[in-house]
Amino acid sequence: MAWIYLLFAGLLEIVWAVSMKQSEGFTRLTPTVITIVGMIASFWLLAVAMRSLPLGTAYTIWTGIGAVGAFVVGVVFLGEQVSPMRIGAAVLIVAGLVLMKLSSS
């Protein structure tokens, strides 16, 4: 169950990161509220997952899901730049996440 909590915590990290961008420096109410609620829910699910997962594993997976997810959303929906180096960096992050998962007991 901890891995499911961690997955949803990572997905919510993507939500709050994107909504923070959309809030335009917290000047728009709806994206600001989504950011705050998403952060609280993401942190709570991360904390629940950490009850049984090691800190290093849980935090690395959580931030990795958020980083790669935010990158993908930025490219696909926000028109951010795509380059071989940026794609390579995302691939390395995903490889690190897979290795972290495989190394956890």
Image (tube, rainbow, N blue to C red):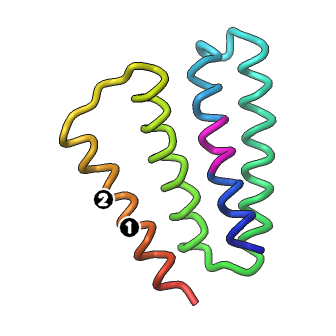
Q: Residue furthest front?
A: 76
Residue type, numbered disc 2: Leu
Residue in the picture at 35% in, 66% down: 95
Q: Label 2 near label 1: C-beta < 8 Å?
A: yes
Q: Residue furthest top?
A: 27
List x then y, in percent, for residue 37: 81, 35
Give the quadrant of the N terminus.
bottom right
Task: Locate residue 97 relative to residue 42 in the image: left or right.
Answer: left
The image shows residue 68, relative to residue 17, as above or below, that is: below
The question of residue 90 being in magenta is answered with: no
Q: Which residue is mark 2?
A: 92
Residue type, numbered disc 1: Gly
Q: Nearer the viewer, residue 14 or 20?
A: 14
Residue in the picture at 56% in, 22% down: 21
Task: Locate residue 49 relative to residue 63 in the image: left or right.
Answer: right
Task: Locate residue 87 relative to residue 98 in the image: left or right.
Answer: left
Are there few (<14), some (14-19), or many (20+) residues within 10 Å of tag 2? few
* Residue interval drawn in magenta: 11-15
Q: Which mark is residue 96?
A: 1
